[in-house]
Amino acid sequence: MASTLDIRRADERFHTRTGWLESHHSFSFARHRDPANTHFGLLLVSNDDVVAPGTGFDTHPHRDMEIVTWVLEGGLVHQDSEGHNGLIHPGLAQRMSAGRGILHSEKNDSWTLTGEPEHRNPVHFVQMWTVPDEAGIAPGYEQLDINDELARGSWTVLASGMARDRDRRAISIRQKHAALQVARVRPGETLEIATAPFVHLFVARGEADLEGAGRLGQGDAVRIGRAEGQRITAGAAGAEVLMWEMTAALGPAAA
């Protein structure tokens, strides 16, 4: 069977705007509900967030979810009930396993760990959620700087639970059927996407042309069924692209 390509444009996403948050949701999230748009493959959430300085998400709970955060600009301070804390910046991959239950907060790093403001810039990040292989695992946290790998301009494994990636330098997720890769593609350069039953591409920055889909702008996404290694070429300003490769999908009950 041939590949299927479902293009989702940036301005078609659900949109949340408050006094401190600008958020675009690729799937149903919070008050935004569409029974026909709850997930793709194993990916349930892909939120494109901009948080104003001096603000952020106050302490809140999560359970049985693998949460990967990728900062595009600025810095994000993480603190959780398991005693983990850290400053996430561009090129630093972060994963939180909610497991049987965790509380955490995320603040623009103008809220430092000491509570003192440092700057007045927004933080821009993409946060993605996928289900774990097993419910009720111990909560966990991992972060890893992959800037050196990104400088090569090719696909870099950001997070993976696949057996093939166990020896790679990447953060781990508790989902054996999913891997997330990222590339900062130089202007005019071409990469092949994964060959997999489910591939979710998100253009986080810049523009690119995808074989069979045409031009993709910042914030555009493509959901590809039975992906066959189509090529993606960065535009004149280059592109930063996030690619979820998944070999399974949620069943109707889990969705």
Image (cartoon, helix red, strand yellow):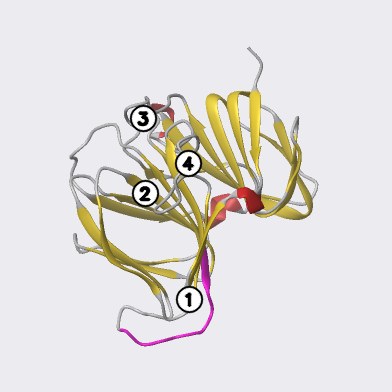
Three-letter amino acid code at the position of disc 4: Asp
The residue located at (26%, 49%) in the rendering is 98
Magenta span of residues: 115-124
**Residue 6 occupies quadrant:** top right
Q: Is mark 4 on a helix, strand or loop?
A: loop
Give the numbered dot on residue 176.
3
Q: Residue at x 34, y 37 (%)?
A: 131
To which residue does mark 4 refer? 34
Q: Looking at the rendering, which quadrant does residue 147 occupy?
A: bottom right
Q: Locate the N terminus by quadrant.
A: top right
Mark 1 lies on residue: 19
Q: Which of marks 3 and 2 is nearer the N terminus?
A: 2
Q: Are marks 1 and 2 in contact (CB under 8 Å)?
A: no
Q: Name the residue under label 2.
A: 67
Q: Which of 224 and 29 is in front in this view?
A: 29
Q: Which of marks 1 and 2 is in front?
A: 1
Q: Could you say which quadrant of the image residue 210 lies in? A: top right
Q: Which amino acid does label 3 sit on?
A: Lys
Is the residue 87 above or below the residue 67 in the image? below
**Of 82 and 130, the residue lying toward us:** 130
Residue 169 screen position, x and y as percent: 44, 44
Measure the C-alpha gap from mark 3 to mark 4. Answer: 28 Å
Image side of residue 224 versus residue 77, left or right: right
Q: Which amino acid does label 1 sit on?
A: Gly
* Left/right of residue 184 with respect to residue 115 in the rendered view: right
Label 4, label 2: how far apart the Cα atoms are: 22 Å
